[in-house]
Amino acid sequence: MRPAPRVLGLLVAALLLGALPVPPGPPPSPSLRGLLPYPPGKREALVARHLANKASLHLLFGEKAARAYDRLLRLELANQQSGKRSAFATAEEALEAAHRFLLAIGQAARKAPVNLEGLPTAPHHVLPHAQEIRAAAHALGLPPGVLAAIVDNEQHGGDKALGLSRGVREVADGVALTLGEAPFSRTLGLAQMSWEDALKQEARLRRFGAWDPLRPFPHTEAEARRALLDPYLNLLFTASRLRGYFNALLSLPPEETRPLEDPWLYYLGPAWHNYPLRAQNLETWEDSFYGFFKGLLYQVVLEGRWTLQGRRLLPLKPLGPGSLQAPSPPVPHLFP
């Protein structure tokens, strides 16, 4: 059957304008109420809570971000019902976690003090490397918030009690080096990037013009490990690996280098970096669920300048000619 003239015209226009191929849409979403097996009164209260969260995101970031949140929440609820891996045991817990993060995101968007109390975040690891995060993300055409969320997830895991995640690897490496053996861990640095994956990024980094041509590219395990101890290179390799995932997941050609902006990337990035097999199986877990909201939060935070005091982010107003604000007493500052 020949395509309708209007459809053919749209296709020609898209080709002429050089538009990115439209990524495949998600499968039809299950009914929200069908995912909430509660008595009518409680079910409608939860629906209202979800719609309020969605409306907040729409006001802050627009329709696409609101739809991405809706997609994530339905995926989480579907996993709870089916018995697949989910971030929470109940819908109430998922909606409450989303609501608490949205409060912090709204505060950051208003340039107000951001209360991170009770939120599983590690801004003390992210903000000192904000410049490197922005540079690495832009070099591969990614939103900086996606990369920042990955750093936060990995470093927050390393800060947990008993040294889970990063801590275990660092201790094992220390013991191995003391014994004169090869290091135990295969992932290193801010984003816990594996040295094997780092060695595979040369072609993509050169295609994006993101690799300094005067700098030799690592070709051995030892060279890759040394490179990954550099915060910027660690993030650059991570961003390159992530861009390869995204091009494949969005049915883009490997050679595609134009920037990606879909808000669903805030979920896909932390999910695929943290646990590709779970992500492929459409499971949800804490790092993937929280990663979406961390990405949105850091996308806003990285645009400004903040100081961290305990579990609060305080905005710093620029000082200079014409400013009437007196300098505040010296405090430790983190400048994204």
Image: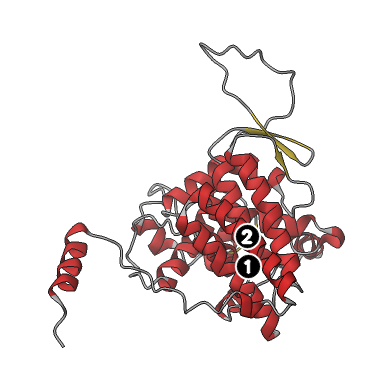
Q: Is residue 175 visible?
A: yes
In the image as oriented, which residue stretches furthest toward the right?
162
Report the Cα–Cα distance between label 2 and label 1: 10 Å
Q: Residue at x 71, y 18 (%)?
A: 328
Mark 2 or mark 1: name the one nearer the start of the chain: 1
Quadrant position of residue 82? bottom right
Query: The residue under label 1 is which amino acid type?
Result: Asn
Query: Up-down: is 202 above or below 326?
Result: below
Count every numbered label the image shows and give the total. 2
Q: Does residue 1 appear to the left or right of 240 in the view shown? A: left
Q: Report crowding for label 1: few under 14, some 14 to 19, many 20 or more residues within 10 A (C-alpha).
A: some
Q: Residue at x 63, y 54 (%)?
A: 294
Q: Residue at x 74, y 20 (%)?
A: 330
> Residue 149 at what x, y percent from top left?
61, 55
> Residue 234 at what x, y percent from top left?
57, 54
Residue at which label 1 appears: 274
Q: Is residue 220 visible?
A: no
**Is mark 2 in CB contact (under 8 Å) with mark 1?**
yes
Q: Which mark is residue 154?
A: none
Q: Residue at x 55, y 51 (%)?
A: 145
Q: Nearer the viewer, residue 115 or 235?
A: 115
Q: Nearer the viewer, residue 184 or 320?
A: 320
Locate the N terminus by quadrant.
bottom left
> Residue 35 at what x, y percent from top left?
64, 78
Q: Secondary structure at mark 1?
A: helix
Locate the C terminus by quadrant.
top right
Q: Which mark is residue 291?
A: 2
Q: Does residue 108 appear to the left or right of 246 in the view shown? A: right
Foreground mark, 2 or 1, reads: 2
Q: Nearer the viewer, residue 61 or 122?
A: 61
Q: Nearer the viewer, residue 318 or 128?
A: 318
Q: Secondary structure at mark 2?
A: helix
